[in-house]
Amino acid sequence: MKTTQSVALAPHKGAALSRENVLLLLLKMRTFIALFLIVGFFTMTVPGFLSTGSLVIMIKHIAINAFLALGITFVIITAGIDLSIGATLGLCGMIAGWMITKGIVLPMFGIAIFPSVWVIVPVVLLIGALIGAVNGWIITRYNVAPFICTLGTMYVLRGASMLTSDGQTFPGLSGNPQLGNTGFDEIGAGTFLGIPWAIWMMIVLALVIAYIARRLPFGRHVYAIGDNERAAELSGVRVKQVKVLVYTLSGFCAAIAGIVVSAQLSASHPANGTAFEMNAIAAVVLGGTSLAGGRGTILGTLIGAFVIGFLADGLVMMGVSEFWQMVIKGIVIIVAVIIDQMQNRMQQKAAVVAQKAVMEGK
């Protein structure tokens, strides 16, 4: 009788497990599903949504969010967060605009030096990386929560951006041929093989970070820290150094975004990058990176950036008001976090079931 009962219950248990496996698979594929649904919806409702011209413009916009999202992916994999990337973008853009339009003034000599774009870009990238390194150092040295540290940094950088120009815009970043500082705006407007430089930069950055994640020991250490920081430390991983480096990378990528935004607009404004960190975090989480750490892929982040970008531009092309756009983006972020938590719970449950099955097999 017991045997008959167990046989009768087995199909129900197997069916339940099968349903959970299917649901878990759908959750893992959520980014691709979301991309397909969004592109399909706007293709049907917005004339010319997938035209060549529209695609190029949209991907140029997507590249900005992709720079930020790619940079913050390692941070989130280590179970951290960086809320200062939008402000870093703004400050780096302002510094570039200041050097192009005002130059570096040397009062003691009564002169102003106007550096070339080949000097401006490395300096701005270095400043962005330094901002990230300071974040990482504060977090690891004083054991400050990343949320609090980077929130404070965000306000500091926003204030610094305002101070560089008294809250005004630096316009006309094309430079002056007589001063030899032209070419900056070509970063935003120039093309190679008919494709804008911003898109090429996005592709190269994604490939480099993906290579680091999959092929280098540093990438494995990042995942190990996110999975179990204490165990990683006991196994010889230099946890503090790795964390400082991931925040440095985040700041570096934010500086790239700041350069590209200012070059595309041919102007720098202190408010550039405001709330961009939210779009970047949404892209990373939509792409399958867990806010709890230890899980995520660069490809997923890139696709997540496309989801957010197509959604934002599609709403604009439909004529949806800016206020409703904010509401919809907020809902997307909330849904992304909920799905992330659902996936975490289901994976933990699956791991427990698998471990139990192994123990019973023994």
Image (spheres, rainbow, N blue to C red):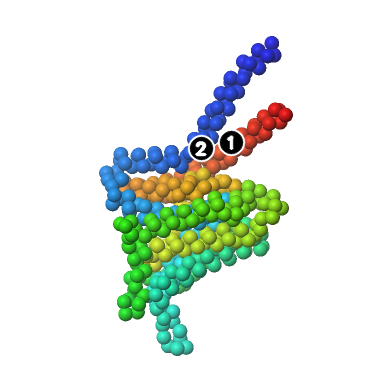
- In front of the other: 268 or 204: 204
Confirm or deny contact between disc 1 and disc 2 (CB under 8 A). yes
Identity, as a three-letter code, of the amino acid under mark 2: Leu
Q: Examine the rendered structure and indicate whether residue 170 appears above or below residue 253.
A: below
Badge 2 element: helix
Identity, as a three-letter code, of the amino acid under mark 1: Met
Q: Examine the rendered structure and indicate whether residue 281 appears above or below residue 86.
A: above
Q: Residue 351 location, x and y as percent?
A: 63, 36
Left or right, 344 with reference to 179? right
Residue beneath label 1, please? 346
- Residue 202 picture quarter: bottom left
Badge 1 element: helix
Residue 92 visible, this orientation: yes
Q: Residue 350 location, x and y as percent?
A: 61, 34
In the rendered image, the residue lying farthest to the top is 1
Residue beneath label 2, please? 27
Q: Residue 152 location, x and y as percent?
A: 56, 62
Q: CA distance from mark 1 to mark 2?
A: 10 Å
In the rendered image, the residue lying farthest to the bottom is 109
Residue 165 visible, this orientation: no
Give the mark nearer the N terminus: 1 vs 2. Answer: 2
Question: How many C-alpha atoms fall within 10 Å of the one at disc 2: few (<14), some, or many (≥20)?
Answer: some
